[in-house]
Amino acid sequence: MKRLSFHAGRGLGALAGALLAVLWVYTMWTPGAALGLSGIGLAIGFMMVVIAVIAVIAAVHGHAAALMIAFLASFLPVGAVLIQAADLQDRWIGMLDLALLAAAALVHFGKEARER
């Protein structure tokens, strides 16, 4: 069961990270986004894309700590605000950040079974 948890966490983390990267790129280039992505906002958007790609790499390799750091780096500054946004696309960014947290927990608890 724990082995299944490990692999489910890896899959969830990779999927959530990939979707986050795609949604951030889409958000940066569509007009009328909830975030005013010009200047510093554009730089933050690119940083969020990089964090999402790092989350995918961490999930594929099964690193729960790196997934947790990716969650904290993406959810606390922006994701917590976007989860309450009116636009559905922006809400999905916040929800997928929470999926990174769930993936980190699944990988962490599933990794114990692999180490025994």
Image (spheres, helix red, strand yellow):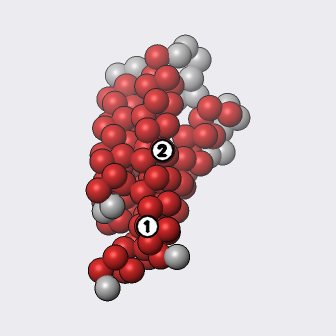
CA distance separating discs 1 and 2: 14 Å
| Label 2 crowd bin: few (<14), some (14–19), many (20+), radius 10 Å | some
Residue at 66 percent of width and 45 percent of height: 84
In this figure, which residue is indicated by the disc labeled 2? 15
Residue type at numbered disc 2:
Leu
Q: Tell me which corner region of the image, top left, top right, bottom left or bottom right, holds residue 21.
A: top left
- Residue toward you, 16 or 84: 16
| Label 1 crowd bin: few (<14), some (14–19), many (20+), radius 10 Å | many
Residue at 46 percent of width and 30 percent of height: 22
Residue type at numbered disc 1:
Phe
- Look at discs 1 and 2 and give the one toward the viewer: 1
Residue 58 position, x and y percent, is 31, 54
Pointer 1 or 2: first along the chain: 1
Residue 86 position, x and y percent, is 70, 35
- Residue toward you, 22 or 73: 22
Callouts 1 and 2 close, C-beta under 8 Å: no
Q: Residue furthest top?
A: 31
In this figure, which residue is indicated by the disc labeled 1? 6
Q: Is residue 36 visible?
A: no
Q: Tell me which corner region of the image, top left, top right, bottom left or bottom right, holds residue 10.
A: bottom left
Residue at 36 percent of width and 46 percent of height: 56
Q: Is residue 17 above or below residue 41?
A: below
Residue 29 position, x and y percent, is 46, 17
Q: Is residue 62 above or below residue 75?
A: below
Q: Tell me which corner region of the image, top left, top right, bottom left or bottom right, holds residue 41.
A: top left
Residue at 67 percent of width and 31 percent of height: 87
Q: Is residue 87 above or below residue 12?
A: above
Q: Which numbered tag is attached to residue 109?
A: none
